Amino acid sequence: MADSAEPEIIFSDLTQDVLIDGHRFSVEIYRTSIHPGWVLSVMNRFGTLTISDNPPYLADGLAWRDFEKRVETKGVRAFYSPNERRKLRL
């Protein structure tokens, strides 16, 4: 019989809350104990998640660099839906 235990979630040391131009985001970088690829998850103040995992990142630092690149190229708008951007006047 196969083991039905849930895989362990392993969080990167790069997981953190960040404040950008007055906007707080929860940035999580994680993988599971059964899959080596890292996932980037960014939650905004409304609880909306932006998840990037396809293809999975080969290293947690690559996921963090992708987060930084998105902030650099699109700003905080990258992590808000169109409706949320209207509410915030972004």
Image: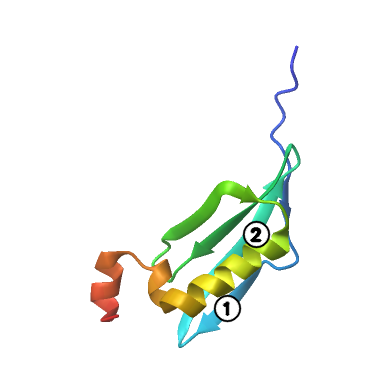
Q: Quadrant of the N terminus?
A: top right
The percent coordinates of residue 68 (x first, y second) are 57, 74
Q: Within the image, what quadrant is residue 67 found in? A: bottom right
Q: Quadrant of the C terminus?
A: bottom left
The residue located at (75%, 66%) in the rendering is 13
The percent coordinates of residue 11 (x first, y second) are 72, 57
For the residue pair 2 and 80, the one nearer the viewer reads as: 80
Q: Residue furthest top?
A: 1
For the residue pair 67 and 50, the one nearer the viewer reads as: 67
- Point out the tag, 1 or 2, that comes first from the N-terminus: 1
Q: According to the image, label 1 marks what residue?
A: 18
Q: Within the image, what quadrant is residue 77 found in? A: bottom left
For the residue pair 45 and 32, the one nearer the viewer reads as: 32
Amino acid of disc 2: Ile
On the question of residue 24 being in view, the answer is no
Secondary structure of the residue carrying numbered label 2: strand
Amino acid of disc 1: Val
Does residue 37 appear left or right of residue 81 in this picture?
right
The percent coordinates of residue 72 (x first, y second) are 50, 79
Q: According to the image, label 2 marks what residue?
A: 29
The residue located at (45%, 58%) in the rendering is 49
Secondary structure of the residue carrying numbered label 1: strand
Q: Badge 2: few (under 14), some or many (20 or more) residues near its Cα, within 10 Å?
A: many
| Model colouring | rainbow
The residue located at (43%, 63%) in the rendering is 47
Classify 70 as above or below 60.
below
Q: Badge 1: few (under 14), some or many (20 or more) residues near its Cα, within 10 Å?
A: few
